[in-house]
Amino acid sequence: MNITGQITEHFSVEEFANPASGEEIQGVMNPQVFAFAKLMEDVRAYIVSRGWAKYAKVNSWYRTEAFNRDVAHGIPNSLHLQGLAMDVKLKLDDAQFAELASFFSAVCANRGAPGEI
């Protein structure tokens, strides 16, 4: 299945899916996933505004159970299984990481969403 399109301005369906997803993502795309994507859009914009990266590379977002077993050693309650967790590759020093963690926590609190880095 060729999956294309945007979830938000800067997050694509291709970033959401993993190679094993196939058509399964159609059943996962729901209002919670879109709300999470909008939250992460704010985080991505913050990263770019601080000059830490031109973009945030998504390594993993939604995972099928089989894919999750392979990459996360079978963590059964991973939020990746619901499309509500994202692994992003960034190179930050300790101060930048602390600042980003604080920003992320504030964004999550303002939206009533759980979240941790």
Image: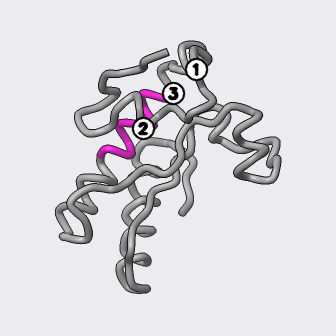
Residue at image x 70%, y 51%?
A: 71
Q: Earlier in the sequence, mark 3 or mark 1?
A: 1
Q: Amino acid at mark 3?
A: Gln
Mark pair 3, 2: CA separation: 17 Å
Task: Determine whether, in the image, residue 45 is placed left or right of residue 74.
Answer: left
Q: Secondary structure at mark 3?
A: helix
Disc 3 to disc 1: CB gap under 8 Å = no
Judging by the rendered image, the residue that carries numbered circle 2 is: 15
- Magenta stretch? 33-41
Q: Position of residue 114 (x, y in %)?
A: 57, 48
Judging by the rendered image, the residue that carries numbered circle 3 is: 32
Counting other residues with Cα less than 10 Å from the Cα at mark 3, is it few (<14), some (14-19), or many (20 or more)?
some
Judging by the rendered image, the residue that carries numbered circle 1 is: 22
Which numbered circle lies on residue 41? none
Task: Determine whether, in the image, residue 94 is placed left or right of residue 73.
Answer: left
Choose mark 3 or mark 1, whichever is in front: 1
Residue at image x 51%, y 48%?
A: 86
Counting other residues with Cα less than 10 Å from the Cα at mark 1, is it few (<14), some (14-19), or many (20 or more)?
few
Q: Amino acid at mark 1?
A: Gly
Mark pair 3, 1: CA separation: 20 Å
Q: Secondary structure at mark 2?
A: helix
Q: Position of residue 64 (x, y in %)?
A: 68, 31
Q: Earlier in the sequence, mark 2 or mark 1?
A: 2
Is residue 63 shown above or below 97? above
The residue lying toward the viewer, choosing from 21 and 47, is 21
